[in-house]
Amino acid sequence: MNLDTFLNGSLTFLNDRDESWKALDENLGRLLIIEEDHSDFLATWKQVTDAIASLSQIERYWACPGERAFTKLTETIRRKEVGQAHLTVQKIRKKLDRQAHRKKHFEVIRVAPRSASQQKSDRRLLREIKANGFDCEFVYVPTAEDALNATLLNTSIQSVVIHDDAPLRSRDCHQDRLQQVVDELAVAGYEAARLERGQLLARQIANLRPELLTYLVTDSQVENIAARQGETFKRIFLRGEDEGELIRAIMLGVEQRYEAPFYNAVVKYARRPISNFHALPISRGKSLKKSNWVEDYEQLAGASLKLESSAITGGLDSLLEPTGPLKAAQEAAARIFGAKRAFIVTNGTTGANKIVTQALLMRGDVVLTDRNCHKSIHSALMEAGASVCYLPAYKLNDYSIYGAVPLRELKRTLLQYKRAGEIDRVRLIALTNRTFDGTVYDPTKVMMECLAIAPRVSFLWDEAWSAFAAFHPLYRSRTAMQGAKNLEAMFADPDYPARVKAFEDVFGAEDWQDDERVLNTPLLADPKKVRFRVYATQSMHKTMTALRQVSVILIHDQDYDHERFINAYHAHTTTSPNYSLLISADIGRRLADLDGYKFGQQLLENSVLLRQALNSPLLKKWYPVVNCVPEEFRESSADDYFEKTTGSKLEKDWQTDEFVQDPSRITLDISSTGLSGEAFKQELMEHNIQVNKTSVNTLLFQVTTGTTRSDASNLIQVLRKIALNCEEKMRNSSKFEREVHEKKVRSLTPRQPLPDVPPFHPAFRVNVQTPEGDVSRAQSLGYDHASCEYFSLEEAERLIAEGRTLVSAKMVVPYPPGSPVLVPGEEIMPAVVQYLLALDVKEVHGLTKKGLRVFTEKALAEELRLREARAYR
C-alpha cells in the first residue's frame, strides 16, 4: 500500500472531520442571525457547503451518524432549512462525542452492497449477540477501494468482513481528496480474479493494519478456499448460512485480542483468601496494615498491593519458564509486534540488550556498532567479551548532535574486514533505530546491503524509542521486524533469484574489487548464502503504555537457538519480577492491539500540528526547528514537509531517504534567546513543562502517545510568552546591552566540533589490519587501581599537549542522552577533552571529582608487551 494515500488521506481527514463538524455547527448558528441579503450571508453559506462537501467524502466510513442521517442533513441544508439543520448538527456532534467515550465500542467494515432490510437484520443480530459488554456497529462500503479508505480513516475499525463479489473501484471516491488506493489490486487482476478477490483485498488491508481480523463471505467452494488461502482469514463463511455465527466469530475475535492473560490471572488470584507462608510480606498490604507509621504509603499504593505476589502457582506463572498466562502474553506480544518470538523484560532495554548480545556472541567475536549507541550496548559487549569496531555517525556540530551511521560507512567497514580475510569474525551489527534526536534508519535497505557483503552477520536494532512504531503504517515501514518481514518475503519471491542473477551479470568479480563501485551500488544479497537473524529491543515504557523498566525483545531468527537464548535470559532476569510491571506489559499490549493505530494516528497528527504552530513568524524567529537529517541523506529534499500539510513530501521522504526525521522528535535551536539548554529547561519547568534532553543551544521535545493537544497548546503559550519577553528586552535594551546579549548568543554556539571516534590504544588492538578493540580486557584492567591514575580535564588537556598518550580506563557517558564519549581502551583525544569541558549537562557518568580515570604508562607498556607476546605465539 502506497503511504502517499495514508498521509494525504488519513492524516488530513482525521483533523478535517472534527473541524468540519465544528465549522458546520458554528456557521449554521451564524446564519440564524444574518439576514439572507446581508453581505456576510453568502460567504458564511459557502463555508457551510464546503464543510458538507468535505464531510460527504468521509462520513461514509463511520457508523455514526450513519448514511441515512447524513443524507437527511444534506437535504435539509440544500433546502436552506437553517434552523433544522443547525439543530440536527448539534445533535450529531453530541452523539459523536458520546460515541467517542463509549467503552468497548468498535466498528466492523462490511465490504458488500447490503439492502436496507439486510442492514436492519444485521443491527438486530448485533443487539442480540453481545460478548463481555462489547458494542459493535457495521460500516457498509460497496467496493474494495472504499474498504481500504475506511481502513485508513476510521480508527474504530477492529474487523473486516469481505464479500468476494465486491467491485474494485468506487464511483464516489473523488481523486482530489482521496488518492486512489487500488493500483496494486488492479495490477494483481482483482476484477478478473473472481475467486481470489477476497484474498487480494485482505492482504492489502493487512499491509495497512495487520492487527485487524478479516472474514470472508463467499458463495464459492469454501472448503477449497480454506485449503488454498485459509491463513489469510480468521474464518470463511458460505453466503446464506447463519449470519449469527459470523457476528459471534467477530465478537470472539475482538474478545481474544482484548484478553490480557497474565493480568486476568493475577486479578483472579488476588481475589482468593490466601494465607501467605511465602516471601513478600508486602503482598496484599499485610505487613503495612500491621504498622501505624506507613498508612500514607498504603493509601498511595492502594489496590496495586493486592496484585503483588511472589507465587508462580495457583494460576500464575514463572517469567523464567512460562507455561501459562505469561507465555500467552508473550505470544500475543509477538503477534502484534510482527515478530516470530517476543520476550518481556523487566529491567529495561539495558537488560534486553545484554540478553541479546550474550545469546548471540562468543568471546572474541567482532561487533560493528554505532559509537554513539546507548551505554547498555557498550556494557553488554564488554560483558560478552566481544571485540568492538566503533562506527562514526554523521555529526551536527552546530548543535552538538550525533546522528546515525551512514550506509556507506557500514559497507566500507565490512569491506575492510572482507579484504583482510576477517569477514567471518564479524558476527553482529548493532545500531540504534530512532536515535534520541529522532533519526530513523531504513532497516530493510541496511540489512539487504550488509548481508550482500557479510551473509552470516546478525543484527541487533536498539529500538528503545520505537515501541509504538509497529502499530502505524508510516512508522512500521522502518522498524526492524518489518524489515525482516520485507526481506523474508523478498527472498521467498520466485522472481528474486532472477533479480540476483541479473545483478551478478552486470556486477562481477572485478566490480567487487573496486571499493568505490561497491559503495556506490545498491547491493542484493544472495538468499542461498544468507542466514537471516534479526533482533530488536524496545522500551514499552518509553513510548507505549507500561510502567518503567518494561521492555520487550523481538526476534526474527532463522537460526534461533532457544537453549542459548534462555540461558542469557536467565542470566539477566530477576527471579523475583515485579507483578505490577508484568501486568502493565500485558495491558500495554492489549491497548496497542485495540487502540495502537488510533494512538499512532493521533501521535503523527499532534506532531505535525505542533510543528506547524512552531513555524509561526515569532516562534520561528526565536526557536527555529532543527532538521536533524543533513541534506546529503535526504534524496527527497523535503525541507518543509513538517511546516505544511504536505503528506506526499513526507511519504516520499520515508520511502526514498537514507535517514528520516521522526516528526514526533522536535529539536529547537534556542541560542537566540541567550539562554543555555539547561537554563531554558529550568525556565520551562517553572511553567510545569518537562523536557528530556538539552545541548548547550538546543531543547528536544518528544511528542508521545500520551501527549495531548492541550499539552501542545500549553507549550506554545509558554514559548510565545518567553519570545515576547525577548522581543521586549531587545526593543528596550541599550547598545551595550544588545552587545552583551549577542556575546551570550555567540557563546552558545559550539566552538569545537564534536569529537570523532577515538582509536583504541595498540595495547588493546586485536588485529593490526582491522580497527576493533578488546574493550572487555580494557574494562578488566581498568578495575585494577594500581594500573590507573586520575587527571582533571585541565590536567589531561595539558598532558596531551605535551605529547603524552592518555588512555581511558572507564566509560564516560554524559546523561542524557546516555551515549559514551569514551570507553575503556580508547585514546583520549584533545577534541574529547574540549567537548567534556564545554558540556552543559550536570550528569556525566565516569567523570568523578578526581577527574578522568586513565591507565598508567607502566600498565599500558606491560599490556602491550603481553599482547605482542600472545601474537608472536
Image (cartoon, rainbow, N blue to C red):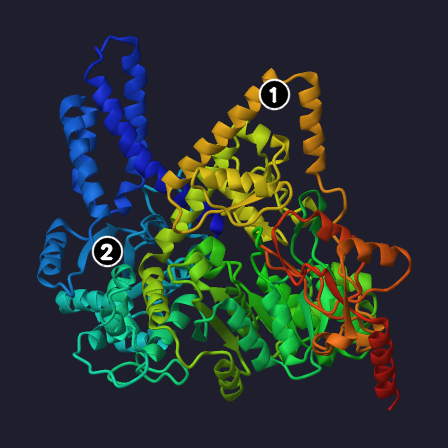
Location of residue 841 in the rendering, given as x and y in whole percent from the top left corner: 62, 50
Label 2: which residue? Answer: 106
Q: 153 or 316: nearer the eye?
A: 316
Q: For the image shown, how many numbered marks are present on the structure?
A: 2
- Image point 23% across, 51% down: which residue? 140
Q: Residue furthest right?
A: 803
Q: Residue furthest front?
A: 292
Say which element carries label 1. Answer: helix
Q: Is residue 8 visible?
A: no
Q: Earlier in the sequence, mark 1 or mark 2?
A: 2
Horizontal relation, residue 665 to residue 501: left or right? left
- Mark number for residue 319? none
- Image point 16% across, 69% down: which residue? 245
Say which element carries label 2. Answer: strand
Quadrant in the rendering for residue 130 = bottom left
Mark 1 nearby-residue class (10 Å; few <14, some 14–19, many ≥20): some
Horizontal relation, residue 32 to residue 705: left or right? left
Residue 135, relative to residue 728: is it above or below? Answer: below
- Image point 49% across, 33% down: which residue? 719
Q: 255 or 265: nearer the eye?
A: 265
Label 1: which residue? Answer: 730
Callout 1 touching callout 2 (CB < 8 Å): no
Residue 205, relative to residue 528: is it above or below? Answer: above
Q: Quadrant of the C terminus?
A: bottom right
Q: 196 or 307: nearer the eye?
A: 307
Location of residue 590 in the rendering, given as x and y in whole percent from the top left corner: 32, 64
Quadrant in the rendering for residue 77 = top left
Location of residue 264 in the rendering, given as x and y in whole percent from the top left corner: 24, 72
Q: Is residue 680 visible?
A: yes
